[in-house]
Image: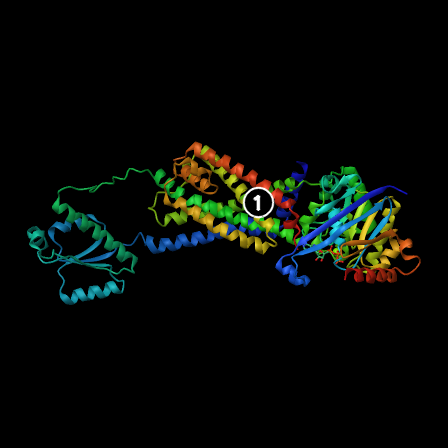
Amino acid sequence: MTEEILKVIDISKTFVLSKKQQKLEGITCDKKVAVNHLSFSAYKGEIYGLLGPNGAGKTTTLRIMSTLIKPDSGDVIVDGASVCTSADIVRGKIGFLTSELKLEDFFTPNYLFDFFSELHNVPEDKRNDQKKKLFDRFGINEFAEVKVGNLSTGMKQKASLAISLVHDPDIIIFDEPTNGLDVITAKVITDFLQELRAEGKTIIISTHIFSLVEKICDRVGIIINGKMVVSDELNKITNGLPLEDVFFDIYSKEAGAEE
Amino acid sequence: MKNILAVIKKEFFRFFKDRRLMLTTLILPGLMIFVVYSIMGDALLNKFGGDSEYTPIVYVNEIPESINNLFNASELKLEKKSYNESEIEAIKEKITKKEADLLIIFPDNFDEVVKNYDVKDGLPAPNIEIYYCSVNTESSKAYSIIATLLDGYEKSLSNKFNINFGDNYDLSTSKEATGTIFSMMLPFLILTFLFSACISVAPEAIAGEKERGTIATLLVTPIKRSELAIGKIISLSVIAILSALSSFVGTIASLPKLMGASRDEGEIISANIYTFTDYMFVLLIILTTVLVVISLMAILSAIAKSVKEASTIISPLMIITMLVGITSMFGDVSSNRVLYLIPIFNSVQAMGGIFSFNADVVAILITLISNVCYSVILVYILTRVFNNEKIMFSK
Ligand SMILES: Nc1ncnc2c1ncn2[C@@H]1O[C@H](COP(=O)(O)OP(=O)(O)OP(=O)(O)O)[C@@H](O)[C@H]1O
Ligand SMILES: [Mg+2]
C-alpha cells in the first residue's frame, strides 16, 4: 500500500445552535452533533470521495481538515502536521476550495493570483509558471483582467480553483467541486482532478452525486449523520452493483439502527 | 511582515483604483463641508453683519443739551426736532415699515428732571422711550448703540466710580482670541471628521469581507491572523486619515467666511499662529487616535454578521465620542494628567491644550503612549477574534 498522506483520527464536532437555527432545523435541542467520532485515511495519489446526504457532515469534516474550524476532539494529520497544533503548516500544504470561500469582486483573477501567491510565499518564477499552466488549462487568460464581480459563475469557479492552487499543493480538498456548474465546465474540472491525480496529488472531494464518485473516485467514505459508515475502495463497496443501490441499502440500515 | 505589506498593498489598490470610493470618501466630505459652511457663513453675515455702508435713520424728539454732544460723537444720522403727536405716529409707522430705524423720545426738561431726581423719593425715574423694530437688523443695531451710549451716560451721572469707561482695555491679542476659538472648535471638528471617516471605511472592509465570504479565503492561507489584523488596521487608518483630511481642508477653506460673520473686519483668522512642533504633536495625536478608533471599529465589525449590523453596533460609540468631543467646547483644558489615560478624551484635551497655547508636553506624551498601548491591545483582541471560528464562521 502507498503512503497514508492524510489521516482523520476520531474527530467530533458539535455546534451550539441559536434559537433561530433551532427553528430552522426543526429541533428543540440546542446542540447539533455534526461530526461524530469520524475516522478515515487518504493515500497519496488517489481521489477520495466523501459521499453523504444533505446535512451529513461532509462540509464540516472538510472545514476541519482545512483548519477553518477546530475539532472538539480527535485530530487530522496532514502530511505529518496536525490541524490542531500546526494549522499554519497545514494551510501551506493544502489547497482548499468550497463555495463559501469567495474572491473579492473588485479584483481581477490575475491580481488575486499574484496576491495569494505572495501570501503562500511562492517565488516569482514559480508563480509565473504556475499561473501560465493554470490559466492556460482553464482558459482564464481571456478574463484574467476582468473584475471577479463581472465574471459568470463558471468563470468564478475556474478562477477560484486556479487561485486555490497557487502554491501547487500536494493535497487538494474540494467541497462539491461541480456544484452549480454546467456539464461542460463540470467536465473541465473533473478532467483536471484526474490530471492532478496522475501527477501524484491526493484529492479529497465531497459530493452527493453518485455518478461523479463512480467516475473519478478510487476510494469512498459514506457519511450518514456525522458518522463514517463505510470507508473503502469503490469496487469493494459496490461489488459491481450500482453505487446508488448500495448507498440506499446502507442508508436504510443505518437509519433503522438510529431509531 | 511581508504578508502585512501584501495586505496593505491590496487594500490601497482596492481603494485608490475605485473612482467611486475615492469620490465618496476623499472628495465629497470636504467639498460638502466647504459648501455648507460657506453658505452658513454668508447667511450669518447677512443676518448679523448687516450692510456696513448703511447709516441708520434716527429721529430724536427734544434732545437735551447733555445728550446732544454724546450722540454727535456717534456715527448715527440724527433727525433732531420737536415733533408733535401726529408726526410721532408717522415716524412709528415708518419704523414698522422699516423706512426708519429708531425714534427716541426724551421727557420734557430732561436735564433738569434728572438733576432733581432722587431715588429716595420713591417716584418713578424719568423714562426715555426708544422705539425700534427688532426684526430689522439695522434698527436693532441702532438700538443697541443708543442704549449703550445712554447706559454709559446714566452711570457717569452718579459718578462714584467708572469701570473701563471709554478706551479699549481688552489686552488680549488677536492671536490669543484666535487660539481660544480654535481650541474650542477644532478638537471637536477633528474628532467628528475622524470618526465619520473611520465609520465609512471600517465596517465595509471587515464586516463586508466577512459577509461576502472573502475573508475566509484569506484565512485558509498561511497568513498569520495577527498579520491580517495589523495589515487591515494600518491600511484602514491611512485611508480614514485621508478622508478626515478632506473634511478638514473643507473646514479650513470655509473658516474665513464662517468666522468673518461673527468677527470684526481686519482680524483675519489665521493658522500661522502655531509652531511646527504644535502641528507635529497634533498630527501624532490624530494618528494614534485613528489607530484606537479603527481598531475598536474593526473588532466590532469582525463580531458583527453584516455591514448593517456593524454600523448599528458602532453608532452608540459615535454618540459617546461626540459627547466627549464637546468637552473641548467648555474651553478649560484638564490639568489632571491621569485623565489623559482615557482614550479619545485624552486626544480632545491634548489638542485643546495645543490650540489654546497651554500645551502640557507630559500630558501629550501620556496621550500618545496610552493610545499606542490601547491600539496594541485592540490589535491583539482583533487577532483573537479572527481566530475565533464561532465568530468568523457562525451561520
Ligand atoms: N456553524 C454552524 N453552526 C451550527 N450548525 C452548523 C454549522 N455548520 C454546520 N452545522 C450543522 O451541522 C450539520 C452538518 O452540516 P454540513 O454542512 O457539514 O453538512 P453537509 O454534509 O456538507 O451537507 P450538504 O450536502 O447540505 O452540504 C448540519 O445539520 C448543519 O446545519
Ligand atoms: Mg456541504
Is residue A231 positioned above or below A169 on the image? below
Task: Name, please, the residue furthest toward the right.
Answer: A240
Measured as percent of width and height from the top left, residue A228 is found at 80, 53
B29 with respect to B74 (left or right):
right
Q: Which residue is mark 1?
A: B239
B168 with respect to B347 (left or right):
left
Q: Please count the marks in the image.
A: 1
Q: Nearer the viewer, residue A1 or B285?
A: A1
Measured as percent of width and height from the top left, residue B370 is found at 50, 36
Which residue type carries mark 1?
Answer: Ile
Q: Secondary structure at mark 1?
A: helix
Task: Name, please, the residue furthest toward the bottom.
Answer: B86
Q: Nearer the viewer, residue B115 or B227?
A: B227
The answer to whether residue A151 of the structure is visible from this angle is yes
Question: In which image quadrant can residue B237 be found?
Answer: top right
Q: Check the residue under mark 1 and report the chain it is in.
A: B
The answer to whether residue A219 of the structure is visible from this angle is no
Quadrant position of the C terminus of chain A in the picture: bottom right
B325 with respect to B64 (left or right):
right
Question: In which image quadrant can residue B91 be found?
Answer: bottom left
Q: Ligand 1 appears in which quadrant?
A: bottom right
> Quick one: label 1, few (<14), some, or many (20+) residues within 10 Å?
many
Quadrant position of the N terminus of chain A in the picture: top right
Q: Nearer the viewer, residue B74 or A78?
A: A78
Please report the residue visible at 74 percent of the width from the left and 58 percent of the height from the top: A55
Please report the residue visible at 57 percent of the width from the left and 55 percent of the height from the top: B309
Measured as percent of width and height from the top left, residue B52 is found at 31, 52
Q: Nearer the viewer, residue B300 or A232?
A: A232
The color scheme shown is rainbow
